[in-house]
Amino acid sequence: MKTVIIIGGGIIGLCSAYYLHKEGHQVTIIDQSTMDFGASYVNAGYLTPSHIIPLAAPGVMKKGLKWMFNPSSPLFIKPRFNADFLRWAWAFNKSCSVNNVERSITAIKDINIMGRDLYSEIKQEERFKFQLERKGLLMLCQTNKMLDEEIKVAQIAKNEGLPVQELSVPKLEQIEPNVEFKAKGAILYECDGHTTPHIFMDEMKAYLIASGVTFYKEEKVQDIKVNDKKISTVHTKNNVFKADEFVLAAGSWSNILSKKLGIKLLLEAGKGYRINSERNLGITMPTILAEAKVAITPMQGFTRFAGTMEIAGINHKINTVRVEAIANATQKYYPNIQLSKQEKEAAACGLRPVSPDGMAYIGKSSTCQNLTIATGHAMMGWSMGPATGKLVSEIISDKKTSLNLDAFHPDRKF
């Protein structure tokens, strides 16, 4: 048995704690927040083996530059004269390549399938009540150009063994008979699932507390001491923590803490927004509005509209222009659905940690022997959460990992 301290209490931190506890380790979680808001609570709740293309793909940087002057664009990269941002932007630009996509596809698919299946295992084993459905995911397209692009991605997914089909508008109307569409067609990924995030998070926290995992909320890590390539102590304002092993799962704040260890973890915060509607809107299928990059999820008791990737540093300011963009896109695809002023005013945001190549960092850095890094999942942290937690547990328990982690190595070069 080892004593393990996890820095970060989001989906990655909680799942790491869950599997480490199952292996018999003594686990403590430290988080700077109240642990009831942020990216783990406001995401679209998707479990997405279908999302096989990393964020850093050919043409994305070009689009980002074009959209830089459009505050309502799906991807907004705010230029800043900051050394960390400039290094990240340079590496991101280099990573927007065919090679990056080709070497990432199988790794992304495998960890997403593992994550999806582990949600089912956790629910069954712990008798959790959180929503978990496997209806699939629709990619809804309004233009022939986008439909052609999505058909190409669907073919890659088919080649990877994922069940996927193209849907005509009449077929789409059969699947979603209670809403009016404005679309040319859709792709249906039958392999995907969806959840209601805050319910899972609440159940997992309650389980961990009942199991003896210790929580320190509103404890910001101020310093980390290292001796002989090993973390000796972690310091917050009120406490000094010692342990055999440490996990860095602090999301968008991970690179700030990694600097204290001499690790250059290239990472930027990608802000996403969500609007909830408790009205019965007739939507029963998780759907991505392909051109607008807006995700719609029928959750437990409400429908969630989520979207945008705003890379503009660490802040939780609500940009109303981007909230309006999500609402406007929804009405463009579903002419009869109009989100209300109150629903938009209650919008929330979360920060997703984005690596330059769109791949998570999972594993040990050569710089620090008793640290396991688990961050940088971009838009797929929720989908990959349980898989990442299990992999972290396997690393710390000195077991053979369930997946090859070369593609996720924290020391990889860009």
Image (tube, rainbow, N blue to C red):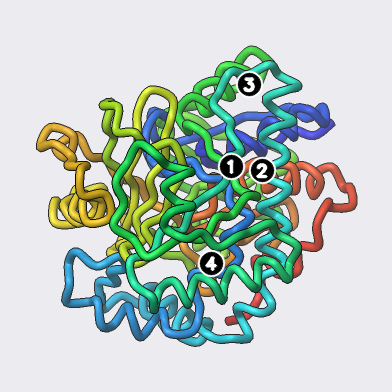
What residue is rendered at 50% in x and 75% in y? 56
Element marked by disc 4: loop
Ranked by sequence position, the earlier of labels 1 and 3 is 1
Q: Which residue is mark 3?
A: 208
Looking at the image, is mark 2 or mark 3 nearer the viewer? Answer: 2
Q: Which residue is mark 1?
A: 193
Q: Is residue 255 visible?
A: no
298 left or right of 339 in image: right
Kindly identify the amino acid type of the residue bearing the numbered disc 2.
Arg
Mark 1–mark 3 distance (CA, rounded to whole Å): 24 Å
| Callout 1–callout 4 Cβ contact below 8 Å | no
Depth order, front residue of 298/1: 298
Picture quarter with the C terminus: bottom right
Residue 339 drawn above or below residue 49: above
Mark 1–mark 4 distance (CA, rounded to whole Å): 31 Å
Q: Which residue is mark 4?
A: 265
